[in-house]
Structures are given as C-alpha cells and as structure tokens.
Amino acid sequence: MKRALLIGIDEYDNVRPLAGCVNDVTAVRPLLARNDDDSPNFECQLLTGPPGRVGRPALLQALADLFAPGADVALLYFAGHGINTGNDVTLVTTDGVEHAWGVGFSEVMGQVTGSKVPEVLIVLDCCYSGAAAGVPQLGAAHAVLRDGVSILTASRSDQPAVEVRARGVFSQALCGALEGGAADVLGKVTLAGLYAYLSESFGAFSPRPTFKSNVDRLRDLRHCRPWVAPAELRRLPELFALVDAELPLDPSYEPTAGLGDAAHEADFKLLQRCRGARLVEPVGVEHLYFAAMQSLPCRLTPLGRHYWRMASDGRL
C-alpha cells in the first residue's frame, strides 16, 4: 500500500498569504493517484483546510495517520510557508504565531523515525526547505537519515521558493517530471530520475532543489507510457547478436522503398522506436532512413547496450 499526504496552505493569520499552494497540491494529486495507464498508484489525502487554512493540530494528526503502520510507502508533500528557525525549519500553519509558527521539521522527522513504514519520501515546496536536511534531529553536522527515507526540497537552506501565476515554479516542474519528463525507457519515474529532471529545470540564479536519501533501491513513483515496451526490448539480443554488433540495413527495411519485406519493415519500426529512445543509432548518417536507403548499418548506443544486457540476462 502506498499513501500520500498532500498539504497546501495559502491562508495565514500572521504572515502574508500565498496564492499557489492549494493549486500546486491539487495539480500533483492526480499524477500520484493514478499511473499513466489509469491504474491505481498512491492513495492520496489532500489537506487544504477550509479553503487554504490548515492549523497545527490538523497537520499533526494528518502526519500521524500518514506514518501509521499498514503502508509500504508514505509520501509527504508540503506546499506553503517555511521559516528557518536556526537549527530547524518550521512548516508554517494557518494559526502560527511568532515563536510557534507551526510544525518543526524536527517534529516531522521524529514521527518518521518512529514509524514502521519501510519507505518515506518527503517533498518540501517551501522557502529555506533545504535546511531541513541538516536539522540536528537527523544526526550531527551531516544529517544521517534512517533506512528508507528520502528528502527532496524546492530550494537550498539559504533560498526562498518562487511562485509565478498562482503556481509554484517547483511544483510545475514536479508535475512535468511525473507526467513523463523524468521517466526512463521503461516509463518508470524513480527518485533518481525525478531529482535529475528537477535539477536540470532550474538555472544558476534560481532556487535549486536539494536531495538527500538513504535507500538501497529505487522504488517507482509513477509508471508512464514506455518509450519501448518491455517485450520489444527483449528482442534486442535477437536483432543484435552481440552487444557491440552492427546490424546491416538495406532498402528492404524502409516501407517507402516498396520492396514488400514485411519482416524487415516490422523490425525497422522497432529500430525507429529504439532510435527515439536513444538506444540505437545509424552508422555514418544522421537518420535510420538514410542508413536503410544507403545500405549502411546501425548499432546500439551505450544506453542500448545496457538494455541489451538486461534482456540477455532475463531481467526484462
């Protein structure tokens, strides 16, 4: 079972309101709740208050429910104000006041540490969220997370986050990643792929996401449409007898040549899909079409050789 708690807080009694946090979690929810093929993924709870208002008691109770036994994975996504309080980061709640702004990240980590949920992912989309990876409760100067815990933040410890047109910039990039931008050839969105995509989405002068993790495997966060289906990837050793072999092409592979070789044309369609996924490349020309028409070969790319080995080892 996979649980997700999505918290968006726009309204505050004692700090300026925000405009995009509820919109952010509302946009993320369907991408976590369902995979690209509409199969179920995370069971999502949306916490936005009555419109935009979430108090400290409600937040603490929701966290307790999220980290309660019974789930294999728990995902927390917080969009709202964050305040750096020296040795902690506080997730500001609607009823927050000076010296008691809301729920300290150390409190969140206290629940995580005591939780029996094997894998926990925390996504903080708030100002100064990068400081959360170094609070003392995580362990000394360089934070040590318990097994199975990952923290992804929208900004470094000294940076504010950014809103544009009633949406957070980070959450827009997050949605793009979950929609498939961070997916691998098989359509899997993992933590590593997610962070790589997000890291490339921001320039040197923008708030930079940070990532800290203590996991021994990469669980899939979402399944998107694969670039090449697993059954087709399993054919790579059939097409390329050796991992570094070149496959000779000729005009019979290209349907527009009109030679009527159905088997070659079917193989060529697969090779073109593999070309789009950066698994195959023509030798000596830029496009597979010209390779076929000029009787030139194609070969596996380094990424293609990786999937060839997986197919050969029976891991696809």
Image (cartoon, rainbow, N blue to C red):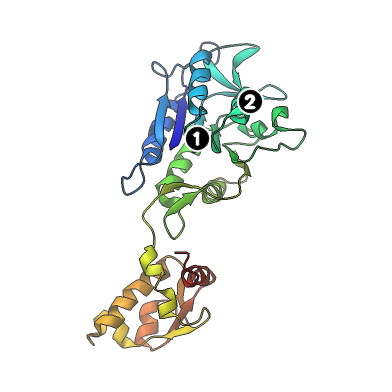
Q: Which mark is residue 110?
A: 2
Discs 2, 1 touching: Cβ within 8 Å? no
- Residue 200: percent from the left, percent from the top? 55, 50
User: For the residue marked with disc 1, what is the amino acid?
Assistant: Leu
Q: Which residue is more in the foreground, 196 or 206?
A: 196
Q: Residue at coordinates 57% horizontally, 47% vertically from top-left?
A: 199
Callout 1: 10 Å neighbours few (<14), some, many (20+)?
many
Give the position of the C terminus as an image quadrant: bottom left
Q: What residue type is labelled 2?
A: Gly
Above or below, 242 relative to 53? below
Observer-nearest of 110 and 122: 110
Asked if one can make out residue 169 in the rendered structure from this viewpoint, the answer is: no
Q: In which quarter of the image is residue 86?
A: top right
Where is 113 relative to 297, above or below?
A: above
Q: Which of 125 and 112 is in front in this view?
A: 112
Q: Mark 1 points at which residue?
A: 75
In percent of width and height, residue 202 lies at 56, 45
